[in-house]
Image (spheres, grey):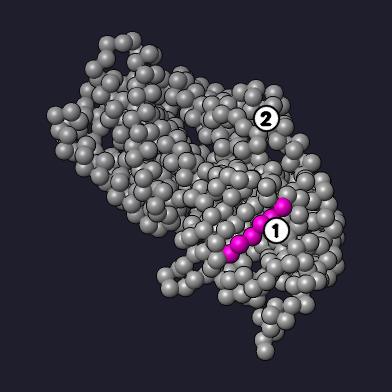
């Protein structure tokens, strides 16, 4: 195995973040407001990273990611409320069930994915997310309908931070591993030029569906963690607002940038809570910060920075005197 | 048996007969040109051969195997690779990754191996890096491995496209106007490159080209298309002196 500088830095960052947060939790130095943020941040990191695979690497706009999350959350939660297994195996099985159920829905959405693209596909995924929400609403005997599914065992709260943190790291690792493999290159080549990808022997249809299935699986896993933290699920938690929030994270993180998606997910999840002191102006400030960040993302300052980075990469090209 | 055999190939778009009754026989190891005025149906013929369009009639067989009805990716796997008239690179990927995409079906490992970065992943990736490096070296592109494809100068982008096509290990390579937009020096360099890859990769080449110096210089046999139908075929001397061909290009 090749261990380079980047890997070491990533490990140091992950261990550092874990140590600081875990230290603060065990030291009892966090207010309730702060502890209530820890798990949602992990959930949204998983959501953003999985959506990044679809939006950033496959290049298709998906507005129904919260739909996959709800499928995972409900199926995982239903298992948790009915099982008598001890905590750890119960949670692990719930994660698998939640992920697999969501993946099945990812496969179903594969049908329109093969026929549509761009704006059209985005609107279909939006409708798809809403359909899932409606189905959950109608299935009152199983899901509790609009009143919600309650009494879900709280197995993934901030008290289980270690477990949730490891899970998040694993999800991020799996996604970034895919991206740096032959499968990831196939997916990225479809984004860059699907006609050339086909001509180079990439089975485009298979990879499009595969990407949606993988992204849906991880969204389902994130949903189970969400359910085990909040204890009660309502269909409203998974409407298109949530999908769009996740999309905003991916766009803000810079399309196709996993690290960026993680940072954006952390900032955007924490921001509304951090701004709570501003009371009435909270959502106004949130929106202003969002606009400012988006402007910065497209500003000459940032572009100059990125250009310099690209230049360095292409430095040898310059030397050649082209 | 010929490598590629095209019989009575035709396609209609509504009322327009873009290619009609095209017959071609390409022997293994040959270098054949497909020429004709603008709009003659040359690129459409390429799109038929690579499965981008499905022909309305006629057959195409590669080494005796019928390939009509196959998807572009499957045709690529059975041994036909192509470049495009308007360059189609994976512009936001590195030069090396462009070639590695084309190695997708040559060096494989499973999804579990890529998710978990199991030992098989490292072994195969190393093989891929070596193979990609070998191909890039032939095109003198090795020092640009990590450059984004979109940052390459035009002539090198054309070379990279050929390199990528060759990475799929084709029996037949289709080049769609490889010299388009090149100055005479670059064209001369391109001719050398084509001769070189022919020897090194033992590949049969069919190319569309407007540059008659290039066509006369390297092609061994020519097919001429005009208004979707075959106007003439033969050696370059025969074809380029054929009055019908001259009329088609220059008018009465």
In the image, which disc is placed on residue A236? none
Query: In this image, B155 relative to B14: left or right?
Result: right
**What range of the chain is rendered magenta?**
B22-27
Quadrant where the C terminus of chain A is found in the figure: bottom right
Majority secondary structure of magenta residues: strand
User: Which one is in front, A320 or A155?
Assistant: A320
Above or below for B142 versus A151: below
Query: In this image, B201 relative to B82: left or right?
Result: right
Quadrant where the N terminus of chain A is found in the figure: top right
* Disc 2: which residue: B124
Which residue sits at x=57%, y=53%? B60
Element under label 2? Answer: helix
Give the CA separation, mark 1 to mark 2.
32 Å
Query: In this image, B178 relative to A176: left or right?
Result: right
Residue A207: x and y in percent read 49, 41
Q: Residues within 10 Å of mark 2 (few under 14, many from 20)?
A: some
* Disc 1: which residue: B206
Indicate yes or no whether the magenta region holds residue B14: no
Residue A86: x and y in percent read 33, 10
Label 1–label 2 contact, CB within 8 A: no
The outermost residue toward the bottom is B252
The outermost residue toward the front is B1
Q: Residues within 10 Å of mark 1 (few under 14, many from 20)?
A: many
């Amino acid at each position: 195995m090749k261990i380079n500088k980047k890997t070491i830095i990533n490990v140091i960052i992950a261990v550092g973040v874990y140590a600081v947060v875990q230290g603060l939790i065990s030291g009892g130095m966090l207010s309730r407001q702060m502890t209530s943020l820890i798990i949602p941040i992990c959930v949204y990191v998983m959501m953003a990273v999985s959506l990044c695979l679809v939006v950033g690497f496959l290049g298709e706009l998906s507005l129904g990611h919260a739909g996959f999350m709800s499928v995972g959350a409900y199926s995982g939660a239903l298992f948790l409320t009915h099982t008598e297994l001890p905590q750890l195996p119960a949670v692990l099985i719930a994660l698998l069930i939640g992920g697999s159920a969501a993946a099945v829905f990812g496969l179903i959405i594969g049908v329109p994915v093969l026929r549509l693209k761009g704006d059209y596909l985005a609107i279909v995924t939006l409708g798809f997310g809403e359909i899932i929400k409606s189905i959950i609403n109608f299935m009152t005997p199983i899901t509790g309908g609009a009143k919600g599914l309650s009494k879900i065992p709280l197995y993934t709260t901030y008290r289980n931070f270690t477990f949730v943190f490891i899970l998040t790291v694993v999800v991020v690792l799996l996604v970034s591993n895919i991206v740096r493999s032959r499968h990831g290159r196939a997916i990225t080549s479809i984004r860059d030029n699907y006609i050339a990808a086909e001509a180079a022997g990439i089975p485009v249809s298979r990879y499009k569906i595969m990407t949606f299935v993988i992204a849906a699986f991880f969204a389902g896993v994130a949903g189970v963690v969400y359910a085990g933290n909040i204890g009660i699920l309502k269909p409203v938690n998974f409407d298109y607002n949530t999908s769009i929030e996740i999309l905003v994270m991916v766009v803000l993180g810079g399309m196709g940038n996993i690290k960026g998606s993680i940072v954006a997910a952390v900032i955007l999840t924490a921001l509304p809570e951090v701004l709570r002191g501003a009371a009435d102006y909270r959502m106004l400030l949130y929106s202003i910060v969002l606009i400012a960040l988006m402007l910065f993302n497209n500003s000459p300052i940032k572009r100059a920075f990125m250009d310099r980075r690209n230049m360095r990469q292409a430095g040898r090209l310059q030397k050649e005197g082209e | 048996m010929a490598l590629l055999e095209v019989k009575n190939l035709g396609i209609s778009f509504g009322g327009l007969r873009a290619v009609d009754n095209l017959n071609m026989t390409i022997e293994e190891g040959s270098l054949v040109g497909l020429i004709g005025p603008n709009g003659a149906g040359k690129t459409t013929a390429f799109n038929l051969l690579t499965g981008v369009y499905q022909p309305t009639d006629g057959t195409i067989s590669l080494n005796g195997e019928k390939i009509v009805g196959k998807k572009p990716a499957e045709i690529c796997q059975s041994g036909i690779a192509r470049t495009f008239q308007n360059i189609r690179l994976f512009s936001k990927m590195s030069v090396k990754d462009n070639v590695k995409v084309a190695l997708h079906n040559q060096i494989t490992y499973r999804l579990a191996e890529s998710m978990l970065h199991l030992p098989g992943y490292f072994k195969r990736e190393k093989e891929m890096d070596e193979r990609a490096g070998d191909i890039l070296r032939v095109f003198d592109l090795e020092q640009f491995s990590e450059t984004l494809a979109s940052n390459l100068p035009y002539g090198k982008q054309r070379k990279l496209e050929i390199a990528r096509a060759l990475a799929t290990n084709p029996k037949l390579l289709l080049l769609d106007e490889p010299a388009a937009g090149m100055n005479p020096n670059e064209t001369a360099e391109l001719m050398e490159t084509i001769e070189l890859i022919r020897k090194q990769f033992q590949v049969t080449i069919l190319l569309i080209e407007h540059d008659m110096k290039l066509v006369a210089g390297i092609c061994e046999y020519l097919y001429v298309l005009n208004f979707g139908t075959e106007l003439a075929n033969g050696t370059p001397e025969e074809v380029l002196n054929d009055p019908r061909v001259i009329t088609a290009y220059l008018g009465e």
